[in-house]
Amino acid sequence: MSQRIPLSWLQLKHEKMKLFAAVSGVMVSVVLMWMQLGLMKALFASAVVFHGSLDGELVVIHSQYEHLLHSKPFSSRLLYRLRGSPDVEEVFSIFLAPVEWKNPWNGEMRSMQCYGIETDKPSLDLPGFAAQLGKLRETDAFLYDRMARPRFGDVVGANNRAETIEPEINRRKMLLSGIIDLGASFGVDGNILVSHANFLRLFPERKSGAIDVGVVKLKPGVSIDSAQKEFQDMLGKEVHVLTREQFKEVELVYWRSATPIGIIFTAGTAVGFFIGFIVVYQILYTDVSNHLPHYATMKAMGFSNGYLYGLVLEQSAQLAIMGFIPGTAVAALLYAGLRSVTQLPLVLEPTRGLFLGILTILMCMISGMLAVRKLAAADPADVF
Amino acid sequence: MNNLDLEPVICGEGINFAFGQGELRKQILFDVDIRIQPGEIVLLTGPSGSGKTTLLTLIAGLRTLQEGKLNVLGHSLYNASQRDLLALRRKIGFIFQAHNLLPYLTALQNVQVMFDLQPDVSPHEGRERAVEMLKVVGLGERMNYPVSRLSGGQKQRVAIARALVGGPQIVLADEPTAALDGTSGREVVNLLQGLAREQNRPILMVTHDARVLDIADRIIEMQDGRLISASETNQPSPHDTTKGASDERHVSPVTV
């Protein structure tokens, strides 16, 4: 069977260089948008990996808690009162504080985030964590973040080679006992996990009764909302009882307001969009101009304006598709490269792909609709 | 049967047309009357600037009629809507001076694309009919050539195939031989005449070319925007058997 003649495509591919330029323009635009949105998402996601890993439905923090690096301890007795509730399965307490890490290879001092956790039961839901809990009970033992930035030294490599690593942390010689995946983010270049007892050894001035984060694990079937309300009333105004999502949101609100990251990356995405828009508009506009005599001929022969608009818009869609696919492939490569350098959780999410695909088609369509206005200049009476 | 008794395909009376406004107004056509009967081949001649092409564009529905009556294929063109003009143009086969083929298509694609105007014709049937038409104009061997690789005469034959493939009710041609040498020009008009006769299709052709005047049933001459004479070269009826001598040239397909 024969097909209808793919007029728009034949016209588009007639001039190979122009087609190449247009597709490249769309591609650059698509890559830019992927990068901007991906980095923004990854940066925000990286800030709440710890929050997401908490093995409990509710979180208790001091009412003046600002973010992970700026916590305010509260009395652990408040948290332990929740143990009396019939709705509660378990409560855990966590200490938070930045520590000074001395690079064992070059002696450089760097700041890291330190979590002091309970070692009787796993309070964090991280891969391989439960199995390493026993090691943490030893004096001066710590778990090191696999995704910590390389500036702390090649700790992971040394661990793989089974070398003994005894770095100074807060001027105290500690013993590496394992690796855990947590990840770096805005303010945090790397993390270590220690037991409560070892945390208090690193911070002699901290009191064991003043904790930073309380985690509440509810019994199965208990309503999170009503438990949250009940516990908040029970504990009073000194602390906030939050769901895990609300706890994440506290962190994200801080970073959104403290850094212009949202604005920068949204602006970057807009720049990508406009680059594509301008390139496609330029190409289609000159293309329509060059083909004006042909369009005038077609109008004279009875082709309607709608038919000709359709041709240009089909070309827009073709450019969008031809730019989007390789653009996404390039973005995937860049994501992989950046992931290994920055340890940021960059992923090609299908939903973002769909969003960017729609954005790309929209970008090309708007360009096409503007370029199409030039078609009005094709006067069929000029063909004779 | 005498064609003069039939409804004319083109009937114009008192057509006036001017470009520009006020001081700059320049009148091109003065009180032009024109009638073309079904099956008639009419040539429109006259010096440059005499208004031939303007008259042709008015008949084709490409310009707005300013004054007078003009009825083409049953469409009254005074105050006609764009939609109406478009519908009229779809019934006309156009042949242009510079062939005006789409350079990014092959010969076959240039002809087949006309069926985009006829949604009731399937792409398959459209292709078949385009192939047939190209064979008729003698380009069966070169259907899949890009038009850039065809000679001037071959291009104009593709243009004829394009104009006729959709079964137009009239053919309007503007200097179809102007860009061609004598032999190619002759071949092109013979082909056009032969096909028109075969399908009893009327042709209105603007031409300067004195070499091709003999194909006409009637020649209309224009000067300074007025029709000055209407001579009849042949008998009014295109079916008249007395034209046997010229019929030999109407044989199709043309061999290349």
Image (cartoon, rainbow, N blue to C red):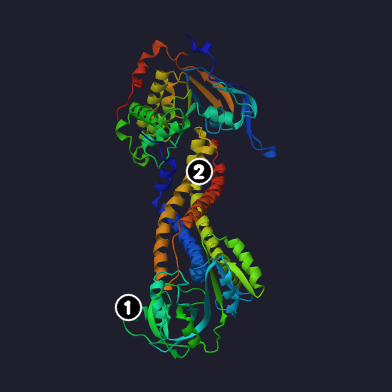
Q: In the image, residue B69 lies at what x, y percent? A: 63, 23
Q: Chain of mark 2?
A: A
Element under label 1? helix
Mark sitting on residue B139? none
Q: Which residue is mark 2?
A: A292
Q: Residue furthest right?
A: B22
For discs 1 and 2, the disc positioned in front in the rendered view: 1
Tell me how many marks there are: 2
Q: Where is residue A248, by image quadrant?
A: bottom right
Reply above or below: A294 against A356: above
Q: Chain of mark 1?
A: A
Reply above or below: A113 against B29: below
Q: In the image, residue B75 lies at what x, y percent? A: 58, 23
Q: Quadrant of the C terminus of chain B?
A: top left
Q: Respond whether the residues carrying marks 1 and 2 are from the same subunit.
A: yes
Q: Residue furthest bottom?
A: A171
Q: Amino acid at mark 1?
A: Asn
Left or right relative to B21: residue A306: left
- What's the residue at 38%, 21% (across, down)? B194
Q: Where is residue B109, by image quadrant?
A: top left
Element under label 2? helix
Name the residue nearer the viewer: B23 or A281: A281
Name the residue nearer the viewer: A377 or B55: A377
Mark 1 is surrounded, within 10 Å at the Cα level, by few (under 14), some (14 to 19) or many (20 or more) other residues, namely few
Name the residue nearer the viewer: A137 or A269: A137
Q: Amino acid at mark 2?
A: Leu
Q: Is residue A148 visible?
A: yes
Q: Distance of mark 1 from mark 2, alpha carbons? A: 68 Å
Q: Which residue is mark 1?
A: A160
Q: In the image, residue A44 lies at what x, y percent? A: 52, 68
